[in-house]
Image: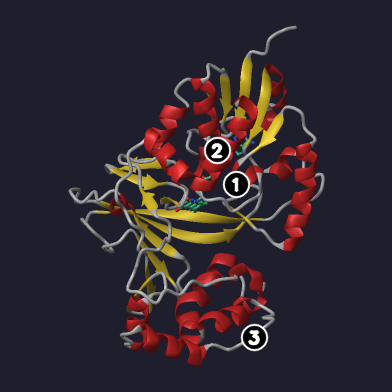
Amino acid sequence: MQKNKYDFLLAGAGLFNAIVAREATRRGKRCLVVEKRGHFGGNVYCEQISGINVHKYGAHIFHTCDKEVWDYMNELCEFNHYVNSPLARYGDKIYNLPFNMNTFYQLWQTRTPGEAMKVIESQRIRNDSPANLEEQALALVGKDIYEILVKGYTEKQWGCEAGQLPAFLIRRLPVRFRYDNNYFDDPYQGIPVGGYNRIFAQCFRDCEMRYNTDFCQHREWAKEAGTTVFTGMIDRYYDYCYGALEYRSLRFENKIMNIPDYQGNAVVNYTEREIPYTRIIEHKHFEFNYRTDTTVLTLEYPQSWTPELEPYYPVNTPENEVIYSKYEQRARGEKNVYFGGRLGCFKYYNMDQVVHSALMLVKELMG
Ligand code: FAD
């Protein structure tokens, strides 16, 4: 029988396929990587601007509660001790996030958990079956937090009035009765020292790379490989045969400023509806890069997705889940094609979940 030229065709050079590529090439397998963009890294990719690693497709903070994933990632790179502590700006005021005792002091000058709980309880509008996101948020955190910190931000994110959004979008709004601005509850977090790209350079080191190439326009290449792993949009792979899934997109606007520091923090959310962007990222703070006199900012504007835009977020409404389950079922019937990652599985995966699921696939395929 004629041997395949490659053991794996990996469609997409993001994090999912980076892990598959690393594990496959370590086992002596030959991999062809086909990537639509001109570089590896997917949405985790960093672009160097003025000596600063700029998270080109949105701020990425690695965090996990999975010790195995953390140890695995630490084999690939060293992490710094960055702790995500975003701020919210509303009018001329600054608030700490996530909602915690510092935020409550800034809102109401409460000093103890008991005082803060009392205010929240007095503002909550109880509702056992909230009809929309607004009712849900008011039931969870009450009027002030909702109006100052949730409403405008969420409406910008979804491009829609909160009263028109489904309640399930915010099942939980974590409220922390401690003075603790660490956004994540996970025990492990950080940013790779020297940026994320080093991880990808290492993982894809022994692969054949074809950039600026859309796999869907070269499906015949799959015949040259034993197995294909596809990390693009699953609905597109199947030519939208069960209907198109929904995504949200983003527009990023970079600003280079000749000042050492613009906002004193990596992430500042703008929670007013009238300001069109949702947040400003100041990248140097991710890597404590304080020696440069220049700083690079990214303003993030949410937008509706259309086929010429990047599909950043799957929209996991019940209607989309029904459509996705049809694609998933069809995918399960494939012999040598596997789907992975955010777009391949239509799931709101964080990086650690992507690494975990890629390692599961590696186990299934290569033992
Ligand atoms: P992707 O990174 O999307 O990579 C898929 C690759 O496939 C892309 O390079 C794409 O160009 C390519 N591709 C698609 N279709 C084709 C095709 N037909 N042919 C060839 N190539 C194709 N996670 C965290 O843990 N922490 C965070 O702070 C965080 N912040 C985020 C912020 C934003 C704005 C976004 C959008 C995501 C964030 N994430 C975060 C999630 C993180 O980006 C994902 O978990 C991770 O990047 C998913 O990796 P992936 O390989 O599945 O997909």
Image quadrant occupied by the C terminus: top right
- Residue type marked 2: Phe
Ligand 1 closer than 8 Å to label 2 CB: yes
Left-right relation of 15 to 321: left
Q: Residue at x 49, y 89 (%)?
A: 121
Q: Amino acid at mark 1?
A: Arg
Q: Are marks 1 and 2 in contact (CB under 8 Å)?
A: yes
- The answer to which of 247 and 125 lies nearer the viewer is 125
User: Is mark 3 in CB contact (under 8 Å) with mark 1?
Assistant: no
Q: Which quadrant contains ligand 1?
A: top right
- Residue sitting nearer the eye, 264 or 307: 264
Residue beneath label 2, please?
16
CA neighbours of label 2 inside 10 A, class few (<14), some (14 to 19), many (20+)? many
Can residue 214 be seen from the camera position used here? no
Q: Is residue 77 above or below residue 326?
A: above
Which residue is situated farthest in the bottom direction here?
Answer: 122
Check disc 1 and report its element: helix, strand or loop: helix
